Image (cartoon, rainbow, N blue to C red):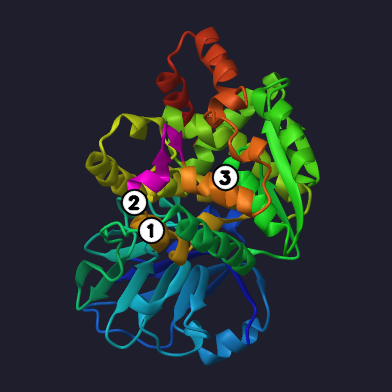
Amino acid sequence: MLKLVLTGIAGVISLSEKIDAEKIAMEISRKLKHRGKPFIFKPKVKPNIKQAKDIFFIQFYTELEDLETIRKEGYCFVLDGKIFYPRDTLLRESQPELFRGYFAYATIDNKCMRVYRDRIGIKPLFYGFTKDLVVFASERKAIRKYASPRRLPPGHVLIVEDRDIKIKPFRVLVKPRPEVLSEEEAIEILSRLIPKSTAMLTEDSVAVMFSGGLDSSTIAKAASQFSDVHLITVGLPDSRDIIWSKRAARLLGLPIHVIIIRPEDLENYVEKTICAIDDWDPLKVMIGLPLYVACEKIHEMGFKVAFTGQGADELFGGYAKYLEMAPQEFLRQNFVDIVTLAEKNLERDEHIAAANGVDLRLPYLSDEIIDFALRLPPELKIRNGVRKYVLRKTAIRLGVPSEVAFAPKKAVQYSTGVAKFVKKIAKKKSQSLSAYFRNIYENLC
């Protein structure tokens, strides 16, 4: 069995003699060198794509045992992420609609090239094409020079065949009708699913990005059953996260590493964050900056894997806006927020982690937890003004102290103190946040 630690993918199909596919593949690999070592190869089969002159796949990896086996056998796939089911998926024919895991996956045969993305969009995938070539990659920046990047929607497959390019759904999220579940039944089910998901994703030693709140505390407590867990907290001096996280860590009985962000370092981190996420949207930058600092330190400390609580707010009704909604309106908006989670949050976080050589893993976004959360009735997500009600009760069942499970939530850009200081920097430059961030994006990235 091959041991694969795969961190990104890309591919190039040239449709004209004018296009040097190998040269483009080399340039893409340099653009994405932060994702790991590139393995550039030509698939042995040639698909039925009119005027296809040359094809190269790029597999990025941090660990890969028996690389020569793949080279000799000429496997015609590249993968970013993990596929848990069916077992040995990459070594035999499988039905992608049966895949369970988080992945961007490309394969080629004598008929066509297909590129798949998991149904929630944990792993990013972008593609572009002109009359002379088709390209795809894990990040937009890698292919922007050659074609206008487009996002492959979660749960969809890109098919390139006979010079046609098609996008089709293969396993998308579907809004089910809520089930009739008692509070106890829901807690019992979720109390099994969270440790199960965490166990599938864990390693011997993991870092947990920790704010001291419900989401990260529950994941940390579950992971501590299987791994040597280290909590990582970042923030400006005397920020809410720094103060509260220390107390929450003591209550959980887990070791914590506190990373203080110095105000004088913020400009540098703003620049790094904007270039990593390839975007200057103020909200994404402000949320992403503390994550960038955490991932940088996690890498320096020697951890390869980091857990976050991403997805819990969407799955279990954690946003304040939901409190003002009637049940049917809440169900509609909640489903929209789940479906758009990748574009709004996941791609940002994945790009930041990849830029720092960290494998970001999201236990709340397992297939089973997503399916369970989609079926939960509104009254178990929000009860008497308490958001994420059933998750809080489950956290207590899993051993999280009630003081932590019911701790109030504050957005990360405020709880870390980042927003306050970055706004001061922009003000000193006599710029709005948008203008300040956009100027960095256009001139440095």
Disc 2 target residue: 377
The residues bearing labels 1 and 2 have C-alpha atoms spaced at a distance of 8 Å
Crowd around label 1: few <14 · some 14–19 · many ≥20 (10 Å): few
Mark 2 secondary-structure assignment = loop
Give the mark count: 3
First reached walking from the N terminus: tag 2 or tag 3? 3
The reply to whether callout 1 and callout 2 are in contact (CB within 8 Å) is yes
Disc 3 target residue: 215
Specify the quadrant of the image occupied by residue 35: bottom right
The residues bearing labels 3 and 1 have C-alpha atoms spaced at a distance of 22 Å
Give the amino acid type for the residue marked by disc 3 in the picture: Asp
| Most foreground residue, 405 or 196 | 405
First reached walking from the N terminus: tag 3 or tag 1? 1
Disc 1 target residue: 181
Q: Give the range drawn in magenta.
A: 378-387
The residues bearing labels 2 and 3 have C-alpha atoms spaced at a distance of 20 Å
Q: Which mark is nearer the camera, 3 or 1?
A: 1
- Is 59 magenta? The answer is no
The residue under the point 34% across, 66% down is 19
Q: In this view, does 98 lie above or below 394?
A: below
Q: In this view, does 289 lie to the left or right of 101?
A: right
Q: Is residue 80 left or right of residue 21?
A: right
Q: Where is residue 298 in the image (x, y as percent from the top left)?
A: 72, 47
- Is 381 magenta? The answer is yes
Crowd around label 2: few <14 · some 14–19 · many ≥20 (10 Å): some
Give the amino acid type for the residue marked by disc 2 in the picture: Pro
The residue under the point 33% across, 58% down is 180
| Quadrant occupied by the N terminus | bottom right
Q: Position of residue 315 (x, y in %)?
A: 42, 50
Q: Is residue 180 left or right of residue 267?
A: left
Q: Is residue 305 visible in the rendered structure shown here?
A: no
Give the amino acid type for the residue marked by disc 1 in the picture: Leu
